Amino acid sequence: MESAREEAFGPNVGQFRRQPTGPQRWYTPVAAIDTTHTSHNIALTACALGIAMGVGLSMTCVCGWSTWGVFGMYVVLVSTYHMLEYLSVALYNPERLEMGSFMFNPDVDNGYIMAMGMSLVEYAVGYGGRTPGVITVVGLGAAVAGQIVRTLAMVTAKTSFNHYVATRQVADHSLVTHGIYAYERHPSYVGFYVWSVGLQVMLQNVCSAVLFSAVLGYFFVKRTKKEELFLIRFFGHKYLEYRNQTRSLIPVGLIKY
C-alpha cells in the first residue's frame, strides 16, 4: 500500500503544465485546473471544497434556523461528501486514487450534476414558501446517517472497495463480510441513497425527493444485480452463503439470477 501511495503522490505530481519565462517568470497559473491527478489540481479542488464548507457553515451560523441556514447545511453536507469520497480512497485504497475519486461526475451521462442542479432550482423556486420544521430535521438526520454508513463502508472494505463495478478479480479484492458488511451487503449504496434522498427531504423538495427515490432505487437495483453476478463469479459458494445470511435494504430478492 505504501508503494501505491508513493506512486499516487509521486515526485511528478504537481508539476505545472507551463513554466513561465522572461518577464513573466514570477507568474504561476494557480487558477488553472483540469482532470489530471496532480497535487496542483488536488489542492485547488480541496481548497474549493474547504471554502464551500466554510461558507455553508457561516450561512448556517449567521442565518440560523431559516431557509438560508438550511441551504448552508446543504452546502456543508455536499462538500463533506465529496471530500470524504476522495480521502477514503486516498487513505485506504491509493492504487485506485484519481481526480474522479472526488465523485463530482460519477456517470458519463452527467446525471448526478443534472439531478443536483434540478434540486437547487426547485429549492430556489419554492424559496419564499418554506419554513424549516420537523421534516427538515428528519432529512438532516437521514443525510448525516447516510454519509456515516457510506464512509464506514468504504473504510471497512479498504482495497476491496471500488467506485465502479469490478468486472475482473484482482489480487487485493477479497470478500468483506465483517463490520458493517455483517448487517448489510451493500452499505455504500444504501448510504448514498439515504444521503441523497435525505438532502431533498431536508430542503423540502417534494419533486426532487420523489424523483431521487425512484431513479436511484432503479439504478441501484440494476447495479446490484450486475455486481452480485460478478461477485458470485469471483467467490462462488462463499458469496452465495454470505448473501443468504446477510440481508440488504436494496430489494435484490426481486431479481432473478
Image: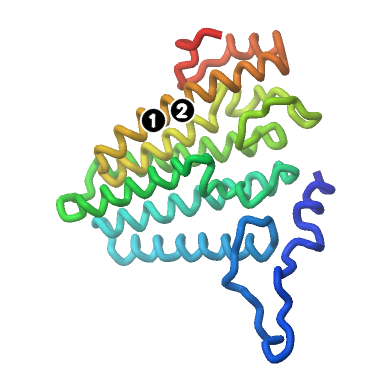
Distance between the Cα atoms at labels 2 and 1? 6 Å
Q: Quadrant of the C terminus?
A: top right
Establish if 245 lies above or below 2: above
Q: Tell me the tag on residue 215.
A: 1
Q: Which residue is mark 2?
A: 219
x then y, percent, for residue 224: 54, 22
Above or below, comparing residue 133 to residue 197 in the picture: below
In the displayed structure image, the side of residue 13 where residue 207 appears, left or right:
left
Amino acid on which disc 2 is placed: Phe
Q: Position of residue 245 (x, y in %)?
A: 58, 11
Asked if residue 40 lies left or right of residue 9, the reply is left
The percent position of residue 61, horizontal first and vertical second, equals 34, 63
Judged from this view, the residue extending furthest toward the bottom is: 23
Amino acid type at circle 1 is: Val
Q: Quadrant of residue 45?
A: bottom right
User: Which residue is at a point 60% across and 25% down the rendered structure image?
Assistant: 181
Q: Please name the residue shown 30% across and 39% down the image.
A: 208
